[in-house]
Image (cartoon, rainbow, N blue to C red):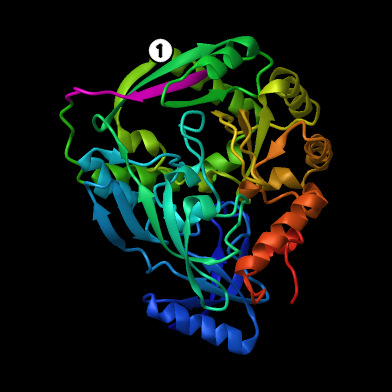
Amino acid sequence: MDIRKKKISNWAQTYSKTCQVIKLKNQNELSEALNFINKKKLNFSIMSSNKNYTDEVFCSKGYIIDITNLNKILEFNYNQKTIVVEAACTLKKLLKIIIPYNYTIGAIPGSEDISIGGAVTNCVHGKDAKYFGCFVENINEITIIKSNGQEVVLKKNEIPKILTFGVFYIIKKIKLNLIDIKCNFVNSKKIIFNDLDEMTQIMSKNNDTFMYGWMDLNSKKIRGYVEIGNIEKNIQIQQKKNTGVLNLIVRYLSNFFSNFIKFSLNKYTLKIINLSIYYSAKLNNEKIISLYDYYFPLKRFPFEKFFRGGVVEIQILIPEKNLKNELINIMNLCGLYKICSYITGLKYQKDQDIDLGFYKKGLSISIVIPKHKARSLNFKYFKEKLSKLIAEKKIYLNLTKDIVFDKNIIDQNDKVNFIKNKKIYDVEGIIKSDFIDRYELNYEI
């Protein structure tokens, strides 16, 4: 067990702090770390791949337990269609094993380096959000460790129906149910829209396996595309051997130009970029792509480095019943307060019973800006208007990506419910993070 001070930054590059970090070599050291922390009567948080937008892994008043090395695939049962992994196993490691056997899982988010444990605690979702739902749907069971060291197995229906943000328990291992696929390729097609009715009709009526979209939020004209995809059988493509050279070249050039791009992006250059994206989608609207590349189209690009001060993503869910009115309202607010979204992603989601989540039936829209823009007076007024809409439950916020709101965004009933559930597992009251301190979701024994 290695204990030392380290400077830690989140993936979004919006939060950085020097912390006391306990890095584990294996599962045996986990018990040792818990005993050490309990004796000192201090707090701790858990970190694995640390691919998060928030201050979720940071524990200013204690230790961070780094479980990065607890990343093994423990069991792959081909016949029973299950796989058991340690919490820090990444999506990349998992998918590279199961896809060649024509298996996958659902709710794959945008980064291949996200850990399975992180995907569970943050209940992530992917391009199949309408068809499949969020990550909890993959789970057969999880083995957890309470803060007093007790080990417990939770079946899927026993897992708390509330976002845990990694502060209920330590996940030791996860058993996932696998999904049969016909082959390893996706037939993908972009459908252009030029008004809100057209966009909402496509997304609400479509039943393809994968569906997500993009819209030009910075244009007076409403335009964008919805990309639909299905895993097709009998597709024969001769794949080029990947030597890794192309990946290295693209990553090097992206890093090289990132400083130039982050200081040159503004409402004028964004108009040109968005116009190029729109017409490119019109011209190249259909393709066949490997499933892995379809999951992670930006894996070669250091996306987070293109934003001054880091990436701030406000991901909002607009329930289906309010869809058109509230989407117009949000677009008007962006125009009024000069909020230029660098990229605006769209997903249509199914309704799921998860408290503190934004898993309602409707459309999610992402407003992505650099952190330095989130310090402006205009953004302050924009945030106040959004807060009011959230309080009235006209829209919902994806808290797992939030770095700009605070305790006032969560109503008292949700806080009480969160703490009630937390007490069941964090019996010592010591699993804490800066993230839940910000929302005042802790309790004292």
Q: Residue 334: image x %, image y %?
A: 74, 28
Q: Quadrant of the C terminus?
A: bottom right
Judged left or right of residue 106, residue 160 is right
Q: Which residue is mark 1?
A: 283
Q: In the rendered structure, which amino acid carries the disc numbered 1?
A: Leu
One can see residue 433 in this view: no
Q: In front: 149, or 196?
A: 149
Q: List the single residue furthest toward the bottom.
A: 39
Q: Residue 342: image x %, image y %?
A: 60, 33
Residue drawn at x 80%, y 36% is 382
| Label 1 environment density (alpha carbons within 10 Å; few <14, some 14–19, many ≥20) | few
Q: Which residues are magenta?
A: 225-236
Judged left or right of residue 186, residue 137 is right
Q: Residue 405: image x %, image y %?
A: 75, 49
Residue drawn at x 60%, y 57% is 165
Q: In front: 121, or 82?
A: 82
Query: In the picture shown, does residue 265 fall above or below 145?
Result: above
Please check the rendered image and state whether residue 163 is part of the magenta-colored stretch, yes or no.
Answer: no
Judged left or right of residue 328, residue 258 is left
Query: In the picture shown, does residue 201 fall above or below 58?
Result: above
Residue drawn at x 51%, y 29% is 130
Query: In the picture shown, does residue 433 fall above or below 397?
Result: below
